[in-house]
Image (cartoon, grey):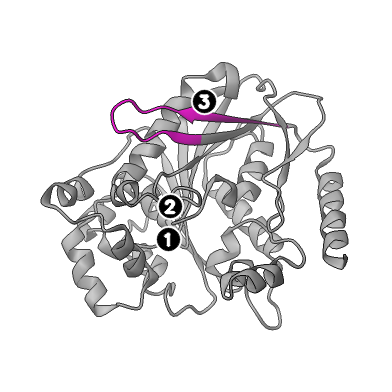
Amino acid sequence: MKIAFSALLLTCLTTIALAGENPVGFRSSTLADAHNDRTLEMVVWYPSATTAATQLIGDDVVFVGASAVRDAPPAAGKHPLLVLSHGYRGNWSNQIWLASALAQRGYIVAAINHPGSTTHDRSPKAAAQLWQRPVDVSRAIDGVTAQPEKFGLVANDRIAVVGHSLGGWTALEIAGARFDPDRFAHDCKAHPQLSSCAVYGKMNPASTSESKTALAADLRDERVTAVVTLDLGLSRGMTDESLAALPVPTLVIAAGVPSHDLPAELESANLAKRLPTASSRYVEISDASHFSFLSVCKPGAEAMLEEEVPGDGIICRDGDGNGARSRDLIQQQVTSLITEFLPPSPRN
């Protein structure tokens, strides 16, 4: 009963806190694919001038959702577009906190479920097509820009991609980074403890010569003008040459809490050293864990997850010890870093 009451109280406080802020619309959509049988689930958060009542989106027994008005009319004017790419076995709701915050600041924010590597779709065939992830993001850009009556007009010179974990790899690929399967396989022999290597092994995206060629191809979408990675993985497989010549500004944000299987020094920090210094920025957040970039957990959620599946409660844990902040405060910092890095929106 205490858990239920605390969750109810937190929901009420969240709703009150959002009252009076810029209204946000929310729409869900399905992007069909006649060629590759890869239908995408997409949701879009966008600025609106609606006065209709809001409802909580993505709120469940574990994570806190965010308020928006379903199917609200979009606000007038052009808006920057940002596409979110989730991590391995994640889903579009993982970065609701960021989508909502940026939509309130004037951004159109689209999030998609990547087939095969999402929470409710773990098809081995779809997961093995790792090179389709950047294509998914391009399809989301197509879907939003083609429907201004639903989501608002996109400022085509301001299109960014933000990715968490495997989504960070996706963001870099669409920006012009190139992946070398042989380089990555060799590196995993030297660093077998990395979770990136374990995930890559499960997906098995380079099992044939054709798939290796597809994975190593140039997957850049020239419409993308900036990218942000949130504690990414698989970066060690990217070529030095492609990273040194990456044509768009890049913000690399790392979780600084010590980690055996995803240490910042071997992933995000290593990536940042290989990017152009003039157009990239590296920030390591000392009290953030890999899971600090997921939505805020409700009171009692960690204990509930541990009881159901021992070990799963880790997704609700951030930094420990004196000075460690709440996930909400960490995410406020991340939001500020991103909005400061990206070109300003008309609504700022």
The residue under the point 81% across, 25% down is 52
User: Which residue extends farthest front?
Assistant: 308
Instruction: Name the spot of residue 154 as percent of width and height, x first.
Output: 52, 25
Asked whether disc 2 touches disc 1, contact meaning CB atoms under 8 Å apart, the reply is: yes
Residue tagged 1? 232
Query: Mark 2 Cα within 10 Å, few/some/many (few <14, many 20+)?
Result: many
* Label whose residue precedes the other's in the sequence (2 or 1): 2
- Up-down: is 129 above or below 327? above
**Secondary structure of residue under mark 2:** helix
Give how far apart the Cα atoms at labels 2 and 3 are.
Answer: 22 Å
Residue 31 seen in this snapshot: yes
- Residue 167 got which mark? 2
Residue 325 in view of the camera:
no
The residue pinned by badge 3 equals: 154
Q: Is residue 112 left or right of residue 93?
A: left
Amino acid type of the residue that numbered disc 2 sits on in the rendered structure: Gly
Image spot of residue 178 (x, y percent) = 24, 51
CA gap, disc 1 and disc 3: 27 Å
Image vertical order of residue 87 relative to residue 302, above or below: above
Q: Looking at this rendering, what residue extends furthest in the left direction?
A: 209
Which is more toward the observer, 129 or 131? 129
The stretch of residues the image draws in magenta is: 24-41
Q: Measuring 37% from the left and 32% from the top, which residue is drawn there?
A: 223
